[in-house]
Image (cartoon, rainbow, N blue to C red):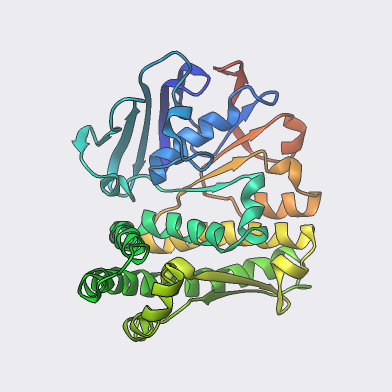
Amino acid sequence: MIISRVTVDNYRNFAHADITPDAGVTVFVGENAQGKTNLLESVYLCCVGRSHRTSHEKELIRSGENVARVRVQARGNMGTRSVEIAMSPTERRRIKVDGQPVSKSGEMMGCITGVLFAPEGLRIVQDGPAERRRFIDMEISQLHPAYYYALQRYQKALRQRSELLRSPSPRSEFLDVWDEQLITAGCEIIRMRRDFLEKLSAISAEIHAGVSGGKESLTLNYAASTTADDFADMLLAARESDIRRMTTSVGPHRDDIRILINGQDARAYGSQGQQRTAAISMKLSELQVMREETGEWPVLLLDDVMSELDPSRRKFLLKHLDGVQVILTCTDMSDLAGAPVGRQYNISAGSASLAE
């Protein structure tokens, strides 16, 4: 998949920008706080339907404006595709896919696929289970819109069950209703997470061995709170305890991904260099899994990543990007020495100009 055009209006600090990325490597270069990351964010927004930086949509709208609009066009195996998202502080967001309005965010999933790697990507390794669940949920949703809808159904049932558990006297017949919905959606989530992680783990291990020079092994284990086969029984067995604690103790919302380097927990025992290598390996493996699933490479979005890497990791990353469209940001072009840059945009104070 190749992104051919990115247009933003009243988005973050941009009044307007019109970008035509190269099919290879496109660079947004400029000082910090000028808008480079905002442009990358706008592309990823049209891939996954949400910002990776904020859950408050009003923050995406330029100060003093009523509507922000982002449009991304791409070409791939399915022909020319487009996603457009319009956001307002007073109205529901409006989404168009291939020029046609859609009523659900899930209808845009998989239209334009992308993998994002930013300095905060280390949070996949360093933070708690919620960050790793968010990581896997975003990637699977791009590949399988059915997963996105299962997540929505699960989260709705979980909220309703939690409200019921907090009531003075939760009634069993009402809990039965929400349990059934949790089980149906939850089993679908568990199975799809397990399948995706099996593929991701195998490819990550191979890549990590390469980037570490064969000195380290990387293993990703799905630490599920239950299996699809046992979910119904475990949820029922935990009911009395859940009522006392007023929370749902079993289900995909309790899952984690264990990231092991040489058999040890990378979060607890890995150095920052090892954690960064693990994160790079996981991101590069995402690219390959998505290519295997869709038949084409997703776009890779790199936010000020090169400056964070030592020369050997930088060289390894560039080596694995052949054939992949890359859009990246940097503050200094010297960080990209050796990179086959096809197009450069200078970013300054919310404006983007194509370098000669």
Q: Would residue 94 appear left or right of 61 to someone viewing this image?
A: left
The quadrant of the image that shows the C terminus is top right
> Dividing the picture into quarters, in which one does residue 129 lie?
bottom right
* Residue 98 shows in the view: yes
Task: From this view, report whether residue 295 is shown above or below residue 11.
Answer: below
Front residue (pair 45, 112): 45
- Rendered location of residue 102, percent (x, y): 21, 39
Identify the residue shown where x is 33% and y is 57%: 148
- Rendered location of residue 3, percent (x, y): 42, 37
User: How many numbered discs?
Assistant: 0
Task: From this view, report whether residue 221 is shown above or below residue 246.
Answer: below
- Rendered location of residue 224, percent (x, y): 48, 76
Identify the residue shown where x is 75% and y is 37%: 335
Q: Would residue 23 appear left or right of 236 to someone viewing this image?
A: right
> Dividing the picture into quarters, in which one does residue 218 lie?
bottom right
- Rendered location of residue 21, percent (x, y): 49, 31
Task: From this view, report whether residue 17 is shown above or below residue 47.
Answer: above
> Dividing the picture into quarters, in which one does residue 233 lie?
bottom left
* Residue 319 shows in the view: no
Front residue (pair 157, 204): 157
Identify the residue shown where x is 43% and y is 79%: 241
